[in-house]
Image (spheres, rainbow, N blue to C red):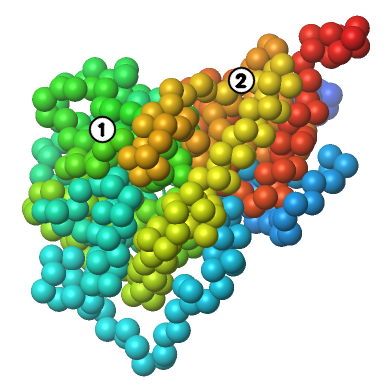
Amino acid sequence: MLHLRSSQFSRVMVKLGPVFSVRHLLVLSLAINVSLMLTVIRERVKVEEILNMFSTKLQLATVSPSTGDGETTDNGEAIINLDHGDPTMYEKYWQRMGDKTTVVISGWQFTSYFSDPKNLCWFLEPELAEEVVRLHRVVGNAITKDYHIVVGTGSSQLFQAALYALSSDASEPMSVVSAAPYYSSYPVITDCLKSGLYKWEGDAQAFDKSGPYIELVTSPNNPDGFVRQSVVNRSGGILVHDLAYYWPQYTPITTPADHDLMLFTVSKTTGHAGMRIGWALVKDEIIARKIVKYIELSTIGVSKDSQLRAAKVLRAVSDSCGVAHPFKEETFFGFSHHSMESRWMLLREAVNRSGIFSLPEFTPGFCNFWNRVFEPLPAFAWLKCGDGIEDCESFLRGHKIWTRSGRYFGVSPSYVRISMLDRDRTFNLFVKRLSRIRSQRRMRLEHVD
Ligand SMILES: Cc1ncc(COP(=O)(O)O)c(C=O)c1O
């Protein structure tokens, strides 16, 4: 492409003067300007593409969060933002609990970097370690005996620490894979620093490269809610189990998990995403030390204030399980399980009415925690658009419902992921609006009726 500064342009004009008429020169000047404008537009498109990757964050900044509960009338005007998995549904429970989880920290307290200098994870508050072990025992969803507990600033930091720990001795970048649809943050987090240690290689089901690899197994899975196992099954593979949703409000607890490296987070357990606390259960001491090293290098530990708050919240959850029948709404899991059950029932009704959408069907399983059989109630709805709609995200956007397209999860844009964990008001508005969307066929039938 021809790029000329104005001084160069005048010089060219003078030289070409005798050969071309003024009209020729005007046409040439117009062509150059158009080409420059196209370059600028192309650059802008590139910038917009990048911004779109993070559009969800920008949207969050421009949409005020909903507040009260129960109110469901908005004349179809309000934007319903269910793109993120922000777990605000749980606020209601914690409001009811009043001061049970209030933490007061004086200015002179917890000023040191160190929490437990003799522990492998020297920045782990012993109180939090104790409550993590207790909650896993109460729920029965993970073995903690003979595991090292490493605390992180959310499980997102632990995920990065795990990649570092598992690849730091590799002679070439280790492949990182996960079966599609995979959690949309995995590719962006893995490649954000263009590390020489590891590299995102996409869908584990299509992975055929030789050499060592890391497979991320999310179970139940974000976005589709299915229970998963590793799919590559080759030597040289290391598994990271992201068990963010392996809690009894979402899925039957069938067995205590005992994988080599397991990640958990308070974000999805109790709804305290803003605390930024996650924990890893790690079998191998050397790997655990490397995870600790990464956190030491990146943030010199993890906020003590948040750890103490998390400890108090986890203690309240375990305590609540002991004081009442687990099904009662005063227990944390009783409240959250009932909320999920009624939300899934309302959503399925709305989807059935529409004739356009479909949802995954789950096989019920026996839950050792509830001592009964139930069908999974995932934190996200993995909705598929039918009726010839190829871009489900755009279609729903037309109805002012913001969701996340299947393409971010490595699959077709005919799917979208929808958060099931927003506040009651937002969820109720969403279901009401969704149930008003009808397929052409259904409308014709209703008209005939
Ligand atoms: C599967 C999975 N892992 C990890 C995270 C991030 O958790 P945290 O808030 O602890 O960083 C999420 C959040 O949506 C998730 O869905």
Q: Which residue is mark 2?
A: 358
Location of residue 248 in the rendering, given as x and y in whole percent from the top left corner? 41, 44
Crowd rating for badge 1 (residues with CA inside 10 Å; few <14, some 14–19, many 20+):
many
Q: The residue under label 2 is which amino acid type? A: Ser
**Residue at the image point whose x is 42% and y is 90% from the top:** 106
**Residue at the image point whose x is 23% and y is 72% from the top:** 126
In this rendered view, identify the residue nearer to me: 330 or 419: 330
Location of residue 424 in the rendering, given as x and y in whole percent from the top left corner? 67, 50
Q: Quadrant of the N terminus?
A: top right
- Whether residue 10 appears in this view of the structure is no
Check the image and report above or below for 363 versus 213.
above
Q: 317 left or right of 383?
A: left
Location of residue 392 in the rendering, given as x and y in whole percent from the top left corner? 65, 25
> Residue lying furthest front in this view?
325
Q: Which residue is mark 1?
A: 215
Quarter-of-image position of residue 179: top left
